[in-house]
Image (cartoon, rainbow, N blue to C red):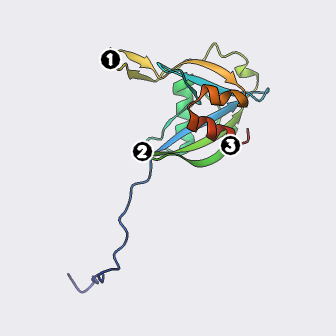
Amino acid sequence: MNKHTTPIPPGNNLPPVTAALPVSCGTLIVNPDGLLLLCHVTNTAKWDIPKGMQDSGELTLEAAMRELREEAGIAFAPECFADLGLFDYRPDKRLHLYLLHCGDELASLDHLKCTSFFPHHATGDATPEVDGYRWAARGQLAALCWPRMAQRLQALHW
């Protein structure tokens, strides 16, 4: 210890630094009829919004926009996104959501395509994260989405 350091008295230690929870960033895309765009999660019976984990150094909006491109093949200008905020989601991660009201550009979903892949658990083959798209009404979310996601989406104004 030198003359420029001061010992910390016992009992006055600072609390341990804890790592922040990872953040999944996603977008609620709502069409003119008030329906929400959902992506079918490959190899499950569930649907989800386009979302995914924020990369190191990436802004939440950048992550949400990247996930939208990767999971649906679509892009919108940053000013089209309204920030809904950061939410508790699971014990191991949080959720940062954005809202986007689209127009006729998504009247058909036939052109949407996932370009993000993971290795299939049994074969190792490259498998798209999502394999289908649909519009859903608020009242359909409980049947289509995982319970925690359905609750979060139903609690938001869109």
- Tell me the kind of residue under disc 1: Gly
Q: Nearer the viewer, residue 103 or 49?
A: 49
Q: Which of the 4 image quarters holds residue 29?
A: top right
Question: How far separated are the C-alphas under marks 1 and 3?
Answer: 38 Å
Residue beneath disc 2: 56
Q: Would you name the residue on which mark 1 appears?
A: 124
Q: Which mark is residue 39?
A: none
Quadrant for the N terminus, please: bottom left
The answer to whether mark 1 and mark 3 are in CB contact below 8 A is no
Dot 2 alpha-carbon crowd within 10 angstroms: few under 14, some 14 to 19, many 20 or more: few
Question: Is residue 51 among the parts visible in the rendering?
Answer: yes
- Of tags 2 and 3, the one toward the viewer is 3
Q: Earlier in the sequence, mark 2 or mark 1?
A: 2
Q: Vertical placement of 147 versus 110: above or below?
A: below
Position of 11 with respect to 95 (left or right) is left
The amino acid type of the residue labelled 2 equals Ser
- Where residue 116 sits: x, y (%)? 46, 24
Label 3 SS: helix
Name the residue rendered at 47%, 41% in the picture. Answer: 54
- In the picture, measured across the screen, residue 10 lies left or right of residue 105, that is left
Q: Residue at x 29, y 84 (%)?
A: 6
Q: Residues within 10 Å of mark 3 (few under 14, many from 20)?
A: few
Q: Upstream in the sequence, badge 1 or badge 3?
A: 1
User: Where is mark 3, residue-wise?
Assistant: 155
Helix, strand or loop for disc 1: loop
Inter-mark Cα distance, 2 to 3: 29 Å
On screen, 5 above or below 128? below
Q: Where is residue 106 drawn, in percent x and y? A: 70, 21
The quarter of the image holding the C terminus is: top right
Going from N to C along the chain, the mark reached first, 2 or 3, is 2
At label 3, the amino acid type is: Ala
